[in-house]
Amino acid sequence: MKKVAFYTLGCKLNFSETSTIGRQFEDKGYLKVDFQENPDIFIINTCSVTENADKKCKKIVREAKKISPDSYVAIIGCYAQLKPTEISEIEGVDAVLGAAEKFRLIELLDDFAKVQETKVLASEITEATTFNNAFSINDRTRTFLKVQDGCNYGCAFCTIPLARGKSRSNTIESVLASAREIAATNVKEIVLTGVNIGDFGIVEGKRNERFADLVYALDEVHGIDRFRISSIEPNLLTNEIIEFASQSKRFVPHFHIPLQSGSNTILRKMGRRYLRELYMDRVSKIKTLMPQACIGVDVIVGFPGETDELFLETYNFLNQLDISYLHVFTYSERANTRAVEMEGVVPMKKRNERSKMLRILSEKKRRKFYEENLGKTFTVLFEEDVEEGKIHGFTENYIRVAAKYDPMLVNELKLVTLDQINEAGNVEVREPEMVYEKH
Ligand code: SF4
């Protein structure tokens, strides 16, 4: 029985895809093992957004070859699609597969028999037009379910459309089938994942269905207690979806909404499809209907043309906004994007300073959000995440809580009252003894 190991860089989408490819191997009789367990085959799923993607990829290949010198190494993922030739030149790589090929790698790589030449099977990204269903089974508690892939937006800084292709989706019927399959494994929470999930509904180039209808349909699936929308563009997060989430027992009050900049000048240069006023309106709609909702924000600092004044516009905008945390990205130049041609390059030192300022702001926001919720009762899904005698989990509104470790709590939903913030920044709860009533 051949042994195969996987390594994943990047986002939830990559994790869901690696997990699915892993199941394909198991179905064909391969044994899935850990990276250290002398595998015969290594599959490395790469990311183009990761800083120094090339160095990371080389390092992992080197480690793989140290563990199993005669192993077969295949590279897949966004970076493989963007730079197939470059990757094929890395010592020890046997095959590179692009976005249109990665789900067929077992069939394409001929029993993983080593040949002299590195195989490069990466068609043009325009060929990646079919949707491949994927979901991760990482632990017993949460699953990332891919419902959409690719993006038609073309923001000035982004390589994702070049690496993943045009927007395309699963059908509602097929997502429901996956959700039921996941429910049968006793997973309690599904995180809906995609590149631009609000754009859900395009099949073979035609818009057939809507994201809102997917949400309505999933809400009826029995056996899954929670659905989380991983990240959604502000212009696609409609009142209809927000209003529905505010009434739903299964869709949780947690929204992650990319902002990228709080300056309209920069938003226009980035080619984003909204201005800050719309963003403000989305936040206020959510908070009016769900005052306890958690709102996470993606923001990029140091985009070309971001002067000190324009950065301050972003800082002040975020400071006054009722949000819960930030994911801060320091802008870095990416080949073949419009932004690399733009004037007004921000020196790296400044980019790092701005990033630090926003990270501090994020910590303040998170703490304030946690403090506002102390004394209130929420439902926690406890995970297999144990540190120093404490078990951890997340509330529906994404507050990370800590309770005294009890193995019986793993993968259980419990009603808890938030007590106090501990030194690690998590919220301690009173005894999680109240039973959660399943819906
Ligand atoms: S919406 Fe913009 S940032 Fe997001 S994946 Fe599409 S092009 Fe990239």
Image (cartoon, helix red, strand yellow):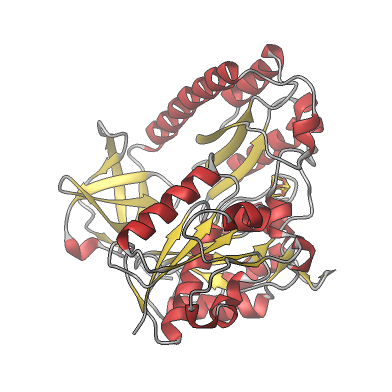
Query: At 83% across and 69% down in the image, what residue appears?
Result: 205
Q: Indicate whether 145 appears above or below 376.
A: below
Give the mark count: 0
Q: Indicate whether 187 appears above or below 24.
A: above
Compare residues 432 and 106 and report the one nearer the observer: 106
Q: Indicate whether 89 appears above or below 181.
A: above
Compare residues 124 and 337 and report the one nearer the observer: 124
Query: At 33% across and 62% down in the image, what residue appears?
Result: 35
Question: What percent of the width, then of the height, locates residue 240?
Answer: 71, 56
Residue that sits furthest to the top in the current view: 309
Question: What percent of the width, then of the height, locates residue 39?
Answer: 34, 70
Compare residues 199 and 21 and report the one nearer the observer: 21
Task: Quadrant for the N terminus, please.
Answer: bottom left
Query: At 53% across and 17% down in the image, what residue appears?
Result: 353
Task: Quadrant for the C terminus, please.
Answer: bottom left
Residue that sits furthest to the front in the current view: 116
Q: Is residue 196 visible?
A: no
Q: Quadrant of residue 406?
A: bottom left
Q: Is residue 69 visible?
A: yes
Q: Is residue 367 left or right of residue 16?
A: left
Question: What percent of the width, then of the height, locates residue 27?
Answer: 44, 86
Question: What percent of the width, then of the height, locates residue 141?
Answer: 36, 64
Query: At 48% across and 27% down in the image, what residue appears?
Result: 359
Q: Quadrant of residue 426?
A: top left
Q: Is residue 325 left or right of residue 289?
A: left
Compare residues 68 and 300 and report the one nearer the observer: 68
